[in-house]
Image: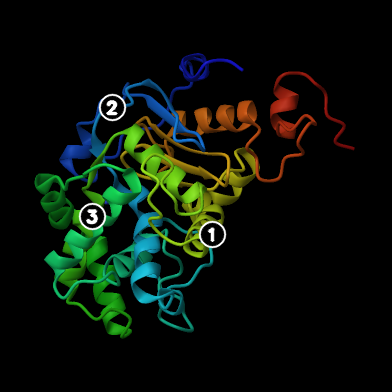
């Protein structure tokens, strides 16, 4: 098995995409930043490149907000947010037409809601609970970057619109401003690839953090969250992702991707240039390589060649498509 350094190096020629510019702090990201970390069942970690560079977690927080909301509501969050893929952009101004619920917890509407379903009798209290919960997933103390969260609130017009839309449907209890503030602070928690990889691994290993040994959420919650990552985690690119990579994952505008391969490993990659769906271009390329090298595809066939038909054609193995 090639080293993680070699696997990372194998996709350095992959270029393209553009750094997100929704807030100045994201627009300033170094497009060459490229880090990866992998966490195995015994908590052992491998890392390569810029794996200890801090960045705001952005939408990679959404699986963990869903997990905390499920834990704090005793599963009732599942009545309040759908679990169907949308085929639309992450910030689409759309709710389920027949229920007024957000379509799923991996798009902005859903995460605005789940962030506000966690315990706490004020916005600040919910934010403290979220930061503590995320820290348990990561196995270390994480912090919110206040400048980034304020910028998110200032520039997040679509998030304010979504919060108002949910209030008009009776889906959201809090004021729109408070709900957006809690969500913006959650998106502005600072992580590096190693912390995010441990978070992904905690979901991959049934809610138990493999580094600290803490059972952060139940096995049932981990299963629910990883299932929805598989179907909705890469927004309207989730089908393409599942075919090519085959590992439940969540993308984000900071260029991070968190991967949870059940019982196998957790991983995180950061590389800021994004494709048109908001997925890190190099992050996806490296995810494919990791999936192939470690045999992680959910629908692969152990012991038999399991690269996609497209990849086999690329390397000239020859696939009979007739
Ligand atoms: N902060 C971003 C937002 O809500 C997160 C979006 C993302 O990472 N896709 O708009």
- Closer to the camera: disc 2 or disc 3? 3
- For mark 3, what is the residue? 132
In the picture, residue 244 is in which quadrant? top right
**Alpha carbon of mark 3 to alpha carbon of mark 1: how far?**
21 Å
Nearer to the camera, 33 or 221: 221
x and y, in percent, of residue 188 in the image: 21, 48
x and y, in percent, of residue 227 in the image: 55, 58
Residue count near mark 3 (Cα–Cα under 10 Å), binned few <14, some 14–19, many ≥20:
some
Which label's residue is closer to the chain start, 3 or 1?
Answer: 3
- For mark 2, what is the residue? 52
Identify the residue shown where x is 31% and y is 77%.
166
Nearer to the camera, 32 or 158: 32
Nearer to the camera, 135 or 163: 135
Residue count near mark 1 (Cα–Cα under 10 Å), binned few <14, some 14–19, many ≥20:
some
**Alpha carbon of mark 2 to alpha carbon of mark 3: how far?**
20 Å
For residue 277, say whether it is visible: no
Within 8 Å: ligand 1 and the Cβ of disc 1? no
Identify the residue shown where x is 78% and y is 31%.
303
Which quarter of the rendered picture does the C terminus lie within? top right
For residue 16, say whether it is visible: yes
Identify the residue shown where x is 31% and y is 24%.
33
Within 8 Å: ligand 1 and the Cβ of disc 3? no
Q: At numbered mark 3, what does the secondary structure look like: helix, strand or loop?
A: helix
How many labels sit on residues? 3
Residue count near mark 2 (Cα–Cα under 10 Å), binned few <14, some 14–19, many ≥20:
some
Q: Residue furthest right?
A: 322
């Amino acid at each position: 098995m090639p080293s993680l350094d070699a696997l990372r190096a194998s996709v350095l020629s992959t270029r393209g995409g553009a750094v997100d510019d929704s807030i100045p702090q994201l627009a300033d990201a170094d497009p060459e930043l490229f880090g990866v970390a992998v966490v195995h069942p015994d908590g052992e970690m491998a890392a390569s490149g810029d794996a200890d560079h801090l960045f705001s977690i952005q939408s990679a927080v959404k699986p963990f907000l869903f997990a905390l909301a499920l834990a704090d509501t005793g599963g009732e969050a599942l009545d309040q947010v759908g679990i169907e893929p949308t085929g639309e952009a992450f910030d689409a101004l759309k709710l389920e037409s027949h229920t007024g619920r957000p379509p799923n917890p991996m798009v902005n509407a859903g995460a605005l809601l789940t962030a506000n379903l966690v315990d706490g009798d004020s916005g600040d209290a919910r934010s403290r609970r979220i930061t503590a919960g995320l820290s348990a997933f990561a196995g270390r103390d994480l912090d919110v970057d206040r400048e980034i969260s304020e910028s998110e609130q200032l520039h997040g017009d679509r998030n304010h619109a979504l919060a108002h839309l949910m209030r008009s449907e009776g889906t959201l209890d809090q004021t729109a401003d408070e709900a957006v503030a809690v969500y913006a602070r959650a998106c502005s928690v600072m992580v590096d690839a190693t912390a995010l990889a441990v978070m992904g691994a905690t979901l991959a290993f049934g809610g138990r953090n493999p580094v600290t040994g803490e059972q952060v959420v139940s096995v049932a919650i981990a299963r629910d969250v990883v299932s929805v990552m598989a179907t909705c985690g890469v927004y309207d690119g989730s089908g393409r992702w599942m075919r090519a990579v085959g590992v439940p994952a969540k993308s984000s505008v900071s260029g991070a991707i968190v991967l949870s391969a059940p019982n196998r490993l957790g991983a995180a990659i950061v590389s800021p240039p994004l494709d048109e769906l908001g997925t890190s271009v190099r992050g996806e390329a490296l995810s494919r390589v990791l999936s192939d090298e470690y045999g992680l595809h959910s629908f692969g066939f152990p012991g038999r060649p399991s690269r996609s038909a497209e990849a086999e054609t690329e390397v000239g193995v020859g696939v009979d498509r007739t």
